[in-house]
Image (cartoon, grey):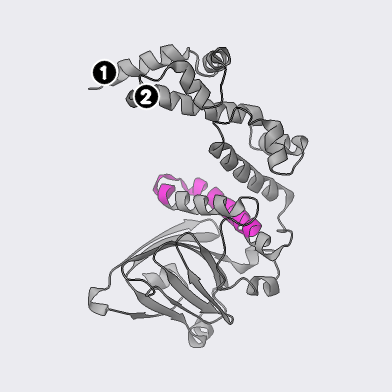
Amino acid sequence: MTKDALMPQRFRFVDPDAFRARIATMPLGAGELTDLSYSPLVSERTPQLIRRSDPELYQLAVVRSGEQGIEQARNQARLRPGEMVLYDSSLPFAAQSALTPGTSTSIVLQFPKSSLRISPRRMRDLLAVPLSATRGSGVGRVLLQFLTEAAREYPHCSPRDTARLGQTALDLVAAFLARHTDRNPGLCPESRRSVHFTVITAFMERHLSDPALSPASLASAHGISLRYLQRVFQEQGTTVAGFLRERRLARCRRDLADPALHDLPVHAIGARWGFPRASDFSRAFRAGVGVTPGQYRASAGGLRRRGR
């Protein structure tokens, strides 16, 4: 039920007879992720509901489709797909998804207010304000991608995985909101490095095809020292160069096994994923995979034929 998945609210439906909704709840450690789909409605959290029950939560909502509105703490926001908004269970609010016709969808992360070290006064300034995922050094984009992927992959995660995902989500939220308050996120050093790892590896994935991508360029792009960058990756059980090489080789393996790319020369596949010199690509691939790129492509083709 909605009352069990989210903080208690009062609902009014624009067209009660045609109303449809879907809700999926996913516990993530101290927090909870909710994937929602609903026909036009208006929801309110009234002073009476707050007096009856206040779980003292923040909710960060990601609008996926449909324009939606919310009012809280004398702020008003009209939200478009891709934008995020924060609201507080301890204050009255009114929200509506009837700004555009059709079904609206969103992902909501709710978490204890005590899990953030940002002052309540500064958090109040962020309530019912459109929060751009593109502000700052990419943390917003990473948070948006993380919540979307976490909701999609949740059924395949173990309880231990979900606990770790919950902590990562809280670290990313703290870093993201701190960007909007222009204050230090107040994370412990380990959590801050975990956030950096998530942000930097997402940046890597977007730039794997750039042959100039290197530990030095990554450190420069994120305004950190090379030594600190190496420590971030060391705490995750890998190295910067090793992680970069593995991700590039993973893309190469995928393309070599793709029948649609069979006519693309082997060296061209290496070049498209950051290995401009054929000899360097062949050497790196053999060291990482155990066979040459050509042998891997031939083996993948044989497996496809036997699987028919």
- Discs 1, 2 touching: Cβ within 8 Å: no
Q: How crowded is mark 1: few (under 14 residues within 10 Å), some or many (20 or more)?
A: few
Residue 63 in view: yes
**Marked residue nearer the N-terminal end (1 or 2):** 2
Instruction: Give the image quarter of residue 18.
Output: bottom left
Q: From which residue to which does the magenta span run? A: 152-176
Q: Where is residue 124 in the image (x, y as percent from the top left)?
A: 64, 74
Q: Distance between the residues labelled 1 and 2?
A: 16 Å
**Left/right of residue 78 with respect to residue 195 in the rendered view:** left
Question: 20 or 154, which lies in front?
Answer: 20
Q: Is mark 2 on a helix, strand or loop?
A: helix
Task: Work out whether 156 lies above or below 119.
Answer: above
Residue ID at (64%, 29%): 212
Q: Position of residue 250 (x, y in %)?
A: 49, 27
Question: Which residue position is annotated with label 1?
Answer: 305
Task: Work out whether 147 lies above or below 255.
Answer: below
Q: Residue 261 has which mark? A: 2
Q: Position of residue 160 (x, y in %)?
A: 51, 46
**Left/right of residue 183 with respect to residue 124 in the rendered view:** right
Question: 120 or 141, which lies in front?
Answer: 141
**Left/right of residue 102 with respect to residue 4 in the rendered view:** left
Q: Residue 35 has which mark? A: none
Q: Position of residue 276 (x, y in %)?
A: 56, 20
